Image (spheres, helix red, strand yellow):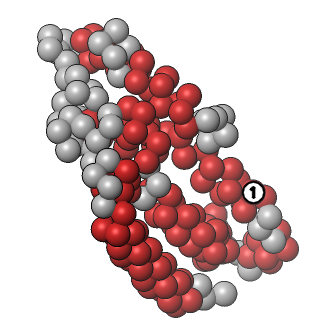
């Protein structure tokens, strides 16, 4: 459900969960902390709080993809491994992990690229604050373009971001070809 929910709705719910009367603050108080942190108002805790929300909202996608990949594994290979006397640990490391390596590669690439697309949670929950604690690159590009009207500068940063993502994707692509051994 978190993955298919609207990110604006999810962010608003998490703002309430981080509020002074929300469950995170109440849980910390339950464990004896008298002055719990202001999750989204503290420069130390704002970015980890956003990261937790982002991971929570995206973990369902990875879970769904891995579940589908596991259901599509060739059973005849596992039956042959059983006949050859392989135990469960050997089958896991020599069959399951190599068969799932294309799925793992896909999820690494898409999750890495998605990690740079955190504009909406930051805009809704903190607006880059407190101070600049949650001012990540994508939000900085946005504020440069639409707050300070430095369109050329923002465009150049966007191209640099594209080249960085493209380079890392190509590096992982080359590493993936060496990793797959079946």
Q: Secondary structure at mark 1?
A: helix
Write the residue at 53% across / 33% down: 8
Write the residue at 47% across / 42% down: 120
Quadrant the N terminus occupies:
top right
Describe residue 94's horizontal placement relative to residue 146 as left or right.
right
Describe residue 121's horizontal placement relative to residue 57 as left or right.
left
Write the residue at 20% across / 23% down: 37
Asked if residue 30 is positioned above or below residue 93 in the image, the reply reads above
- The answer to whether any part of residue 90 appears in the image is no
Q: Residues within 10 Å of mark 1 (few under 14, many from 20)?
A: few
- The answer to whether any part of residue 59 appears in the image is yes
Write the residue at 34% across / 9% down: 21
Asked if residue 182 is positioned above or below residue 28 in the image, the reply reads below
Q: Which residue is mark 1?
A: 68
Quadrant the C terminus occupies:
bottom right
Asked if residue 142 is positioned above or below residue 37 in the image, the reply reads below
Depth check: 159 or 19 in front? Answer: 159
Depth check: 28 or 116 in front? Answer: 116
Q: Which image quadrant for residue 137?
A: bottom left
Asked if residue 80 is positioned above or below residue 5 in the image, the reply reads below
Depth check: 8 or 54 in front? Answer: 8
Task: Point out residue 17 in the picture as x, y percentages from the top left corner.
Answer: 41, 20
Task: Point out residue 103 in the picture as x, y percentages from the top left corner.
Answer: 64, 68
Task: Point out residue 33 in the picture as x, y percentages from the top left corner.
Answer: 17, 15
Task: Point out residue 166 in the picture as x, y percentages from the top left corner.
Answer: 47, 79
Question: How many numbered marks does the figure carry?
Answer: 1
């Amino acid at each position: 459900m978190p993955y298919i929910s609207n990110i604006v709705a999810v962010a608003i719910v998490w703002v309430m969960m981080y509020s002074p009367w929300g469950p995170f603050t109440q849980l910390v108080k339950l464990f004896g902390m008298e002055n719990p942190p202001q999750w989204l108002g503290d420069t130390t805790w704002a970015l980890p709080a956003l990261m937790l929300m982002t991971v929570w909202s995206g973990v369902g996608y990875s879970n769904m993809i891995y579940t589908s990949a596991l259901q599509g594994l060739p059973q005849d290979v596992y039956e042959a491994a059983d006949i050859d006397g392989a135990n469960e640990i050997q089958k896991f490391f020599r069959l399951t992990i190599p068969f799932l390596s294309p799925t793992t590669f896909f999820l690494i690439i898409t999750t890495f690229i998605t990690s740079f697309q955190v504009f909406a949670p930051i805009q809704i929950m903190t607006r880059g604050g407190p101070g600049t604690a949650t001012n990540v690159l994508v939000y900085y590009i946005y504020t440069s373009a639409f707050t300070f009207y430095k369109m050329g500068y923002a465009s150049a940063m966007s191209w640099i971001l594209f080249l960085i993502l493209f380079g890392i994707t190509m590096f992982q692509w080359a590493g993936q070809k060496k990793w797959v051994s079946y």
